[in-house]
Amino acid sequence: MTKIHPTTWLATLLWLVPAMATAQVALFPDEVERVDVIGIERDGRELYAFDALTGGQVSLRLDVAEEVLFEASRGRVGVVVTDRRALGVTSGRDWVELRFRLDEAPVGSILVEDRVALLVSNRRALAFNGQAGWVEEALTPNEFPTVVRVGAAVGVVTTNRRALAIAPGRRGFASEALQVGESLEEVAAEDTLATIRTERRILVFSAPRGSWSTQKRTLR
């Protein structure tokens, strides 16, 4: 058997690494980058978003007596929620607002990740995903949220009736109905996948594909 000299093997490996990196397929047109590039600062009623990629900044003036309830930035997304509206900003763009309706208010946690932010009100599921701005899905009568999860480039909301998923660039939630009496065991979101396990099925949402797939579980 022919022996390969260690130096020859190392040279071959170093040559292959760049080629392997080039061969990787991007998950999205601009890939998922885990680098914070948006900074949010408040000065009185002025809101500023500083963009490390473009070197620019955008500002927005809050209403008189408008109360800030939440603010956070991660990756390319920044979100501020007040008692009157939700505000989102992404790299290279201005602030985008979504006004709350009469008697509408956020409930539970507000989650912000690299490419997606997600919150739920008593009336709607709301997501900010950069290029598409704010995306909303009205809750039906007697429908209520149960779990909210966000990954680097995916978000999922479960209710007592369905699962709603969002991905960067999507202009609407992808909905998957839950069966009557189907109970959740686990809900997770990581990177570009959201996974839901019930006692009957495994549901997986792929952010790059923008759709749900399901697998019936084996009964034991």
Image: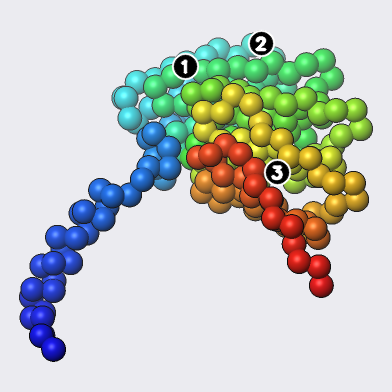
Q: Earlier in the sequence, mark 2 or mark 1?
A: 2
Residue under numbered circle 3? 148
What kind of residue is marked 1? Asp
Which numbered disc, 2 or 1, marks the residue closer to the eye? 1
Picture residue at 85% right of the left edge, 52% below the top: 182
From the image, tell me which residue sits under label 1: 94
Residue at 84% x, 37% y is: 144
Disc 2: which residue: 64
Q: Earlier in the sequence, mark 3 or mark 2?
A: 2
Quarter where residue 86 is shown: top right
Amino acid type, callout 2 = Val
**16 to 123, vertically: above or below:** below
Q: CA distance from mark 2 to mark 1?
A: 21 Å
Observer able to see residue 104? yes
Residue 147, relative to residue 85: is it above or below?
below
Instruction: Measuring from the top left, give residue 4's x and y in whole percent.
Output: 10, 81
Q: Secondary structure at mark 1?
A: loop
Q: Whole-Å distance between the Cαs marked 1 and 3?
A: 27 Å
* Residues packed near mark 1 inside 10 Å, few (<14), some (14 to 19) or many (20 plus): some
Asked whether the beta carbons under mark 1 and mark 3 sit within 8 Å of each other, the answer is: no
Q: Is residue 153 above or below residue 80?
A: below
Q: Position of residue 216 (x, y in %)?
A: 74, 57
Q: Could you tell whether 207 is left or right of 37 in the image?
A: right
Q: Nearer the viewer, mark 1 or mark 3?
A: 3
